Image (spheres, grey):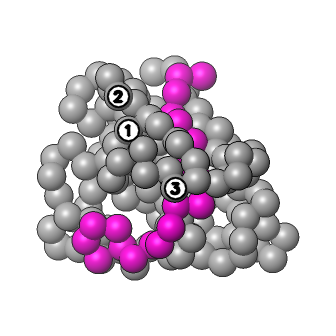
Amino acid sequence: GAPAVAELRSVNGQPVGTALFTQVGDVVRIVLEAQGLPPGTKGVHIHEVGSCEAPTFTSAGGHFNPVGKQHGLLNPQGPHAGDLANIVIGADGKGRLETSASLVTLGAGTNSLLDANGSALIIHAAPDDFRTDPTGNSGARIACGVISKK
């Protein structure tokens, strides 16, 4: 399918990154380039609604989880479809995450990121521990971008 993109903005509306989504077979490849963020390891998740209302981004809802699993790539009852790897932001405020999500699609169906209410990519203030339901203790939402067809 056609690639999708999310333009991420911080809580004060500054552009802080771009994520590209490409369907490759049964998985969605995600390349996230971030800048202007505080250094450290941060959780990254796909959230269930394509809405990024600052400053809390709670309008994006919870993690994208169409099949009702618990949170965490290391959780035996998990993961959410929208659970992704952490991104490491360097001292210069920049980071890059290249990952694949096997539980989502850019096509049609239950697991589509481009469903009626859309979806959003969010970077959190703290690292995801990949276990704790429902958020992995990843803290506040510090950047958000609506995922849309390019």
Q: CA distance from mark 1 to mark 2?
A: 6 Å
Looking at the picture, does residue 117 appear above or below residue 75? above
17 lies above or below 70: above
The kind of residue on which mark 3 rests is Thr
Q: Alpha-carbon distance for marks 2 and 3?
A: 19 Å
* Residue wearing tag 2: 117
Q: Where residue 130 appears, x then y in whole percent?
A: 36, 74
At 64% from the left edge and 71% from the top edge, which residue is drawn?
88
Within 10 Å of disc 3 (Cα), the crowding (few <14, some 14-19, many 20+) is some
Q: Amino acid at mark 1?
A: Val
Q: Are marks 1 and 3 in contact (CB under 8 Å)?
A: no
Along the line of sight, which residue is nearer the eye, 19 or 49?
49
In this picture, which residue range is highlighted in magenta?
A: 132-150
**Amino acid type of the residue that numbered disc 2 sits on in the rendered structure:** Asn
In this view, the residue in front, 56 or 95, is 56
Mark 1 to mark 3: distance in Å? 14 Å
Q: Quadrant of residue 90?
A: bottom right
Q: Position of residue 44 (x, y in %)?
A: 50, 60
| Secondary structure state at the residue bearing disc 3 | loop
Label ID, residue 49? 1
Check disc 3 and report the residue beneath it. Answer: 56
Q: Are marks 1 and 2 in contact (CB under 8 Å)?
A: yes
Q: How many marks?
A: 3
